[in-house]
Image (cartoon, rainbow, N blue to C red):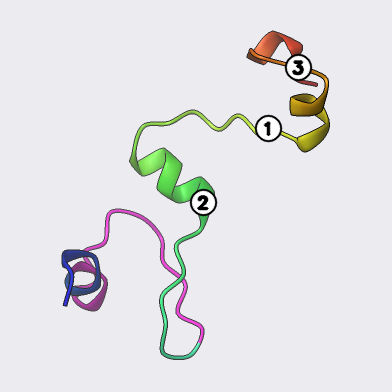
Amino acid sequence: MSTAYRLAGRGSFPCELLRPGHRYVVPTAPLMRALGIEECPVYADDLATGADNEAEIH
């Protein structure tokens, strides 16, 4: 059993978890916050037009 499953089972996982049935689901936004990553969505259209920084992403 992995550390993540042990933490989830003890209720000690560092962010919110969802438990549909017998599996765990880690929502992206809470995980990013737990890791200290700012939320900055990237869309396929932005990549297709060559956007390479936040200023260009709408």
Q: Residue at x 60, y 29 (%)?
A: 40
In the image, which is nearer the foreground, mark 2 or mark 3? Answer: 3
Residue 10 counted in the magenta span: yes
The part of the chain drawn in magenta is 7-20
Q: Quadrant of the N terminus?
A: bottom left
Q: Is residue 18 left or right of residue 48?
A: left
Kindly identify the amino acid type of the residue bearing the numbered disc 3. Gly
Q: Considering only order in the chain, which callout, 2 or 1, is on the residue closer to the N terminus?
A: 2
Q: In the rendered structure, find residue 50 and report the number of the disc placed on it.
A: 3
Is 25 drawn above or below residue 28 in the view shown?
below
- Label 1 with label 2: CB-CB less than 8 Å: no
Query: Where in the figure is residue 48, as x and y percent of width and height?
Result: 80, 27
The amino acid marked with disc number 2 is Thr
Alpha-carbon span between mark 1 and mark 2: 13 Å
Report the Cα–Cα distance between label 2 and label 3.
24 Å
Q: Indicate which disc, 1 or 3, sits on the residue closer to the N terminus.
A: 1
Residue at mark 2:
28
Query: In terms of image quadrants, where is residue 10?
Result: bottom left
Mark 1, residues whose alpha carbon is within 10 Å: few (<14), some, or many (≥20)?
some
**Residue in the picture at 42% in, 39% down:** 33
Q: Main secondary structure of the magenta part?
A: loop
Is 46 positioned to the left or the right of 5 in the image? Answer: right
Q: Tell me the SS state at disc 3.
A: loop
In the rendered structure, are the residues bearing label 1 and label 3 in contact, judged by CB atoms less than 8 Å apart? Answer: no
Of label 2 and label 3, which has the lower sequence position?
2
Which quadrant of the structure image shows residue 2?
bottom left
